Amino acid sequence: MADDLKQAVARRRTFAIISHPDAGKTTLTEKLLLFGGAIQLAGEVKAKKDRMNTRSDWMKIERERGISVVTSVMTFEYDDHVFNLLDTPGHEDFADDTYRTLTAVDSAIMVIDAAKGIEPRTLKLFEVCRLRNIPIITFVNKMDRETRDPFEILDEIEDKLALDTAPVTWPVGRGKTFAGTYHLADNAMRTTDAQEHREIVEGPRSAKVAGLLPANERDAFTEELELAREACRPFNRQSFLEGHLTPVYFGSALRNFGVRDLIEALGEHAPQPRDQEADSRTVSSTERGMTGFVFKIQANMDPNHRDRIAFMRVCSGTLKRGMKAKLTRTGKALSLSAPQFFFARSRITADEAFAGDVVGIPNHGTLRIGDTLTDGEELLFRGVPNFAPEILRRVRLGDAMKAKKLKEALQQMAEEGVVQLFTPEDGSPAIVGVVGALQLDVLKQRLDVEYSLPVDFEVARFSICRWISADNEAELQRFINAHRADMARDLDDDPVFLAQHTFSLNYEADRWKDIRFADIKDYQ
Ligand code: GDP
């Protein structure tokens, strides 16, 4: 039994794809799923027809703007591995959703457009991965188009990301002449035919390699390949796992080329589900007790029922359908009578999930982002972050009679992670905070459609918010008392200081040396 658990965990790879819009994340995702032969989108477990009918109108925003608002989980199998791909919203206005999802993965694929190199969002997302020591595999995409020189791309990764590179494959030709990849360490070629035939060749000067390229490109290519073999760093797994080095693969997602190299790299090199830090101890992914944490809440598409699905990453043990779990924030028991498993081919629901898997738990508002579930142990995982919002707005409601309803609705939206909610200490109307303006559109639409609450947003007097804390409780209280009009409480009742601008924040920080002003708060 214990061995079965170890094996089940060892097979799993839970990862995300990070990239700048247009680099090819969607195309690559599709191609990866093709290899697994199974496509299962989170939320599609219910009959599809049913879902289409009940999808609420707020999804219009997504459709109209052609963006993906909802994070989903896709699971597929290949070569005896189980891959859990956690998708993230492409639009940067939903960046906090992406950051939270990155807390639930063990590795990431960074997709780079071969003509553009490292773009701003790739850089930002890479930084989040680095903060969490997530190992990165790099895929240089669109090699079938005009590209930059591969050496130049590697240099740019090293310079901009301060990350060592180890090209595992090298492109044979580029643009129109792109014909395959050459595996530098084992002298193997993979050609761009349908089977992605792989064969060992004698070396860069092999006639097989030369035969793939037009005569006028051959000499230059052989030289380039020899240089790559001599000058580039070899892959070192330890260094990769520690986040110092990225193995680099070249390919074309559109032409389904190089994707097999990538999926095999994930299986071979990417880490299995990691051990997870909790408040009291480190939880090993292979221990028997079930633990997990919620990193995402998705509203059900049916406005009449208002139920939600909490996405939980299992961190250890075996999650079984029907088991009773303990929600450690409240100490209450929660029956997992209908957990939704997104793995296996063709929608066969499974009865068990292991570390690294993501299960959807339907609930009516019991679960929040950051919650820990166990099979009894008193334990809290930390580390699903809350980022200080960039935009703060007061919510204005036309009909004052509905104030209580609004309060409840905002609370629910905040628990889902749609917005952050701050309740001012002076009793003035609630303030919502978001990272991007589109989140406000989603909030407005959903309040209207799901709760019949038409609202408007007013610019608040404040533009910055910071979580405050101090080692000395009395000092913290003194600060709060001195700033009543600028204080609010977040969803967990933690104190938040609202500042008009950076100047006033710096001024206060200067005067109150013992108070910490944090722009990231980890959920607990
Ligand atoms: P995303 O925004 O990162 O999800 O990017 P998409 O996967 O939607 O791709 C953006 C555009 O690039 C689409 O028009 C794709 O067809 C195209 N594309 C993606 N991969 C490749 C590739 O390998 N080669 C070429 N030529 N085009 C690609």
Image: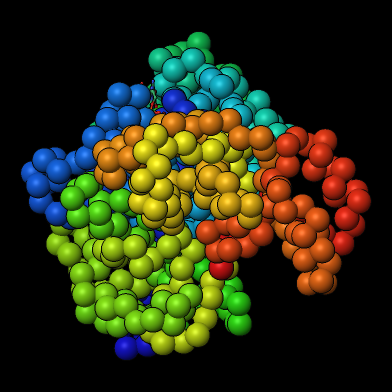
The residue shown at (90%, 57%) is 513
For the N terminus, the image quarter is: bottom left
Q: x and y percent of residue 189 in the render?
A: 42, 38
> Hey, which residue is sitting farthest front in the picture?
401
Image side of residue 3 versus residue 476, left or right: left
Vertical side of 353 occupied by 246: above or below? above
Q: x and y percent of residue 315 in the render?
A: 45, 72
Image side of residue 97 versus residue 298, left or right: right
The residue shown at (45%, 60%) is 369
Quick check: can you spot residue 232?
no
Comparing 282 with 453, the one in front is: 453
The residue shown at (85%, 47%) is 508
Vertical side of 420 occupied by 22: above or below? above
Which of the 4 image quadrants contains residue 341?
Answer: bottom left
Vertical side of 119 occupied by 261: above or below? below
Image side of residue 310 versus residue 102, left or right: left
Image side of residue 95 versus residue 487, left or right: left
Q: x and y percent of residue 289 in the render?
A: 41, 85
Quick check: can you spot residue 282?
yes
**Which image quarter has ligand 1?**
top left
Q: x and y percent of residue 44 in the render?
A: 19, 50
Which colouring convention does the figure follow?
A: rainbow
The residue shown at (58%, 46%) is 428
Vertical side of 87 occupied by 243: above or below? below
For the C terminus, the image quarter is: bottom right
